[in-house]
Amino acid sequence: MNADDVGVRLLRALTSAGLAVENVVIHDVTNKATWCVVPASLQAQAQTIIDAFDPTAPSVIDDELECEAKRHLDEERLASSLVWVILDTYSPPATKAKYLAARNKIVTAFKSQPWK
């Protein structure tokens, strides 16, 4: 796994833990002592999480897939519009509650990928 992938996953873990980390720098992916956070003033708080962090853990990968699916649905206008139109066509009227329920089902399907 490359440093960029580890960095993205670590940053997500740190921010999920409530640390206001802006970025991470991975100098040597095999040596956690070289993993630094920005701002550096949060390094001591982050170090416990860094030491315990496994970028290949199933929960980390699951979290990454969930974030990716939500990003597609929330930030890509076409994807969210398609979901809205399908809801409005087959279960009118489309509502925000119905959209969020459908979104959660899509996220679950995206993470499990039963067709693969």
Image (tube, rainbow, N blue to C red):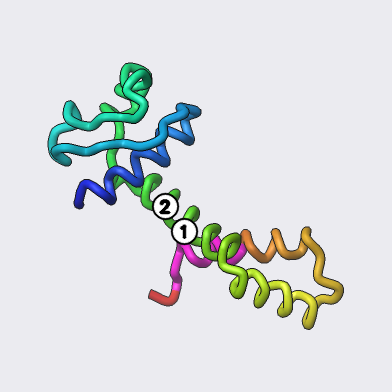
Q: Is residue 52 left or right of residue 114?
A: left
Measuring 60% from the left and 60% from the top, which residue is drawn there?
A: 74
Distance CA(mark 2)–CA(mark 1) = 6 Å
Amino acid type at circle 1 is Glu
From the image, tell me which residue sits under label 2.
64
What label sits on residue 12 in the rendered view? none
Disc 1 secondary structure class? helix
68 in magenta: no
User: Can you name the residue that lies furthest to the right here?
Assistant: 93
Q: Quadrant of residue 53?
A: top left
Q: Which of the pair 111/85 is nearer the observer?
A: 85
Q: Is residue 65 left or right of residue 85?
A: left
**Is the magenta region chiefly helix, strand or loop?**
helix
From the image, tell me which residue sits under label 1.
68
Amino acid type at circle 2 is Glu
Measuring 37% from the left and 21% from the top, which residue is drawn there?
A: 42
Q: Quadrant of the C terminus?
A: bottom left
Q: Tag 1: Cα neighbours inside 10 Å, few (<14), some, or many (≥20)? A: some
- Magenta stretch in the rendered image: 105-114
Q: Which of the pair 114/74 is nearer the observer?
A: 74
How far across and down, in percent of the image, does residue 59 sit? 40, 45
How far across and down, in percent of the image, does residue 44 sit? 32, 17
| Above or below, 18 relative to 61 | above
Measuring 81% from the left and 70% from the top, which residue is drawn there?
A: 94
Q: Is residue 75 left or right of residue 48?
A: right
Q: Tag 2: Cα neighbours inside 10 Å, few (<14), some, or many (≥20)? A: some
Disc 2 secondary structure class? helix
Residue contact between numbered discs 2 and 1, judged by CB atoms under 8 Å: yes
